[in-house]
Amino acid sequence: MHITEGILPTKWVFTWFSVSMPFVGIGLFHVKRKKKTVPGYLPLIGMMGAAVFVFSCFPIPVIALNGMATAHPCGTGMSALLLGPFVSVVIAAVALLIQALFLAHGGLTTLGGNIFSMGILGSFSGYFAFKIAQRCKLSLFWCGFLAGVISDLFTYLGTSIELGLLVINKNGSFLKATAEIFGVFMMTSQGVLCLVEGVVVGFVLIFVYKRRPDILLNLGVIKDNAMLIKV
């Protein structure tokens, strides 16, 4: 999912930074507001940030993309449903920045694009998938599972769109390029990884619910203790 340094032309570097930075700013505002009302909020952000960093710092090369991007789990679906999508964008931005600076994973010029796909699309799609699953009265495990899977799919769709846009000035088909890149992701590693991440998110929610349901209640993830936990 991390687009490699130097892949994006200058106009797209500024475009994706312009799109992503307002979400980061709103996320920081949410952090400042919620830390005053939710006990232990900052330590929880730290733990989720570490989880997202670890989830996303093991790049799997996608040979068919000639080094333009890598694949890996993301973790933003889990952080979004626990902390909210805007805060999850901040967490993703920090993880991506550290990886770009110290691990040569992604890059500084592609940071805005990577925040857009993993932070914005990954967080908001996972968050709304979880809420829709709750409305459908699915069990907690399946709500978490869908959040993890959908978050991953939208993250890689976002990366595919960003890379697909690069062919427009070369008289290529944007839709065809995007579909081909997304297909490459799904047919290599990400088709399996998104399912694995869904299972992990589902079981993490079950684990927390059984031992500390008050955490999920205080964060607004669940509204009462009657939510089904069966798989």
Image: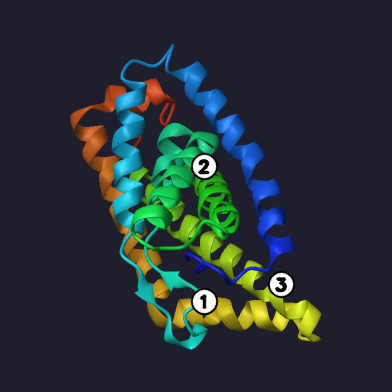
Residue type for callout 2? Val
Q: Residue at x 51, y 47 (%)?
A: 123
**From the viewer's perspective, is the residue at label 1 or at label 3 nearer?**
1
Q: Answer with the quarter of the image where residue 157 lies.
A: bottom right
Residue that sits furthest to the left in the current view? 211
Kindly state the secondary structure of the residue where label 2 is placed. Answer: helix
Q: Where is residue 44 in the image (x, y as percent from the top left)?
A: 32, 29
Q: Which residue is drawn at 39% across and 45% down?
A: 78
Residue 68, which numbered label?
1
Q: Residues within 10 Å of mark 1 (few under 14, many from 20)?
A: some
Q: Residues within 10 Å of mark 3 (few under 14, many from 20)?
A: some
Residue 89, which numbered label?
2
**Is mark 1 in CB contact (under 8 Å) with mark 3?**
no
Q: Residue at x 35, y 73 (%)?
A: 60
Residue type for callout 1? Met
Residue 158, which numbered label?
none
Q: Is residue 57 left or right of residue 120?
A: left
Q: Can residue 226 be seen in this view?
A: no
Q: Which mark is first along the chain, 3 or 2?
A: 2
**According to the image, label 3 marks what residue?**
165
Q: Is residue 179 left or right of residue 184?
A: right
Cα–Cα span, label 2 and label 3: 23 Å
Residue type for callout 3? Leu
Above or below, 88 against 224 in this view is below
* Residue in the foreground of this view, choosing between 209 and 192: 192
Cα–Cα span, label 1 and label 3: 13 Å
Kindly state the secondary structure of the residue where label 3 is placed. Answer: helix
* Residue in the foreground of this view, choosing between 220 and 177: 177
